[in-house]
């Protein structure tokens, strides 16, 4: 697959791009089935809602994500090494894409009634690389909409330079800080269907609601970087291997 010039320009302008019907329904169902088993048996490594939100273990008692999924199951590995998307990643990164297994590499969940809001943030806040030439690939394994935790984005925020005061101590983008409101007011969302993917830049502001429906929302996300963009030694960005995705 190749992106059109218009799609490349849109990604450069907005910091995210939706590609509809990219993954086959059968593949999504197979990935989701394995993920559900790992969630049921709480197979480590995981991140729990209470760890993310800092709240009560009783109130936020569900798994927020399955970590390090590349090595969990062949279906996960095959999706992350998918050959069809490699030319797209090359176009957006401008060079050979490389999987960085230290970041994302996750099955993300929004469990019904026990999930929390995901606050405005940039993914690169805890990443340590020479530059920001990284993007993430988000796969919807089912329908995603605002009520069950759909991603929302702030167009153009990947190119903005924000003062430290714009972020709180956890590096979330403050919605109580008046200068930030003009950016937040620009937020957009795109309902997703099974098999849709969203590509988004490492500095694009995004968030998601908690899930207020009665059905779990399960998604898959992984991150790639340009091959020349080196991780800073002795940081969490070098904790796990990298996988070169030759075109």
Image (cartoon, grey):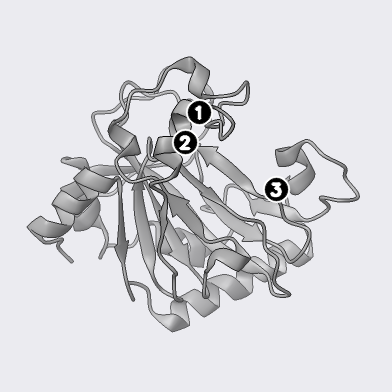
Category of crowding for the residue at label 1, using alpha-carbon neighbours closer than 10 angstroms: few (below 14), some (14–19), many (at least 20): few
Q: Is residue 18 left or right of residue 167?
A: left
User: What x and y, as percent, mark residue 9?
Assistant: 14, 50
Pointer 2: what residue?
181
Q: Which of 53 and 78 is in front in this view?
A: 53
Q: Residue lying furthest bottom in this view?
A: 26
Alpha carbon of mark 2 to alpha carbon of mark 3: how far?
33 Å
Determine the residue positioned at 32% across, 36% down: 158
Pointer 1: what residue?
178
Determine the residue positioned at 47% across, 36% down: 181
Residue 234 in view in this figure: no
Category of crowding for the residue at label 3, using alpha-carbon neighbours closer than 10 angstroms: few (below 14), some (14–19), many (at least 20): some
User: What x and y, as percent, mark residue 49?
Assistant: 74, 47
- Residue at disc 2, secondary structure: helix
- Residue at disc 3, secondary structure: strand
- Residue at disc 1, secondary structure: helix
Determine whether 131 is above or below 93 in the image.
Answer: above
**Quarter of the rendering occupied by the N terminus:** bottom left
Determine the residue positioned at 46% across, 31% down: 180
Q: Residue lying furthest left in this view?
A: 5
Alpha carbon of mark 1 to alpha carbon of mark 2: how far?
5 Å
Q: Which callout, 3 or 1, points to the residue nearer the camera?
A: 1
């Amino acid at each position: 697959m190749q992106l059109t010039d218009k799609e490349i320009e849109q990604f450069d302008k907005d910091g995210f791009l939706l590609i509809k019907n990219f993954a086959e329904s059968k593949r999504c169902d197979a990935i989701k089935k394995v993920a559900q088993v790992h969630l049921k048996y709480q197979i480590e490594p995981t991140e729990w809602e209470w760890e993310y939100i800092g709240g009560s273990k009783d109130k936020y008692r569900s798994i927020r994500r399955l970590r390090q999924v590349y090595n969990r199951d062949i279906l996960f590995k095959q999706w992350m090494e998918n050959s069809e998307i490699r030319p797209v990643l090359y176009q957006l990164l401008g060079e050979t894409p490389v999987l960085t297994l230290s970041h994302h590499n996750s099955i993300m969940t929004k469990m019904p009634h026990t999930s929390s809001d995901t606050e405005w943030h940039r993914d690169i806040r805890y990443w340590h690389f020479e530059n920001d030439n990284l993007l993430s690939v988000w796969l919807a394994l089912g329908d995603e909409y605002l009520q069950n935790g759909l991603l929302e984005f702030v167009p153009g925020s990947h190119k903005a330079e924000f003062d430290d005061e714009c972020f709180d101590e956890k590096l979330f983008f403050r919605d109580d800080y008046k200068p930030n409101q003009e950016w937040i007011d620009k937020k957009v969302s795109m309902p997703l269907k099974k098999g849709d993917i969203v590509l988004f830049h490492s500095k694009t502001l995004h968030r998601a609601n908690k899930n207020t429906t009665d059905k779990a929302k399960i998604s898959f996300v992984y991150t790639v970087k340009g091959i020349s963009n080196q991780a800073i030694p002795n940081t969490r960005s070098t904790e796990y291997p990298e996988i070169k995705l030759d075109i």
